[in-house]
Image: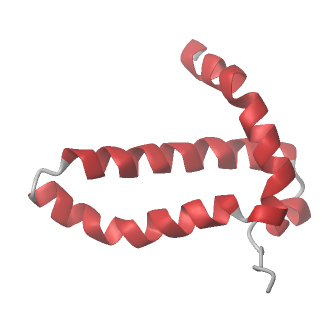
Amino acid sequence: SADLKLLEEATVSVCRSLVEKNPRTGNLGSLIKVFLSRTKELKISAECQNHIFIWQAHNALFIICCLLKVFISQMSEEELQLHFTYEEKA
């Protein structure tokens, strides 16, 4: 759709920067870990009508989906694996 094309054009520089730096920083993996750890709280938030937490979770998932689309479309399987095997240096 036109909106998706506009989103991709607006975020291309951010995505390129993340693709370049993520093997050193592990930011994508960290975002995914934080999202997964917070999903346990989603049911409680829905029951309490905590809309802010639900919006934050929705936005995090949306960002993850957008980034993964870029990563998958522009990388080989081996390159993609490097982005999920980050190990913190001592």
Residue situated in front as seen by the camera: 7 or 24: 24
Q: Which residue lies furthest to the front in this view?
A: 90
Q: Quadrant of the N terminus?
A: top right
Residue 64 horizontal side relative to residue 56, left or right: right
Horizontally, residue 17 falls left or right of residue 66, namely: right
Q: Which residue is drawn at 83% across and 64% down?
A: 24
Q: In this view, does 2 lie above or below 76?
A: above
Give the residue displayed 49% in from the left and 66% down from the top: 34
Q: Residue at x 9, y 57 (%)?
A: 48
Q: Residue furthest left?
A: 48
Point out residue 55 in the picture as x, y percentages from the top left corner. Answer: 32, 44
Most extreme residue toward the top is 2
**Which corner quadrant of the image does residue 12 belong to?**
top right
Total labels drawn:
0
Residue 5 in the image: above or below residue 11: above
Q: Residue 3: image x %, image y %?
A: 55, 17
Q: Where is residue 8 in the image (x, y as percent from the top left)?
A: 68, 26
- Corner quadrant of residue 13: top right
Q: Which residue is drawn at 79% across and 86% down?
A: 90
Q: Which colour scheme is used?
A: secondary structure
Looking at this view, name the residue that lies furthest to the bottom.
90
Image position, residue 58 (x, y; %): 39, 46
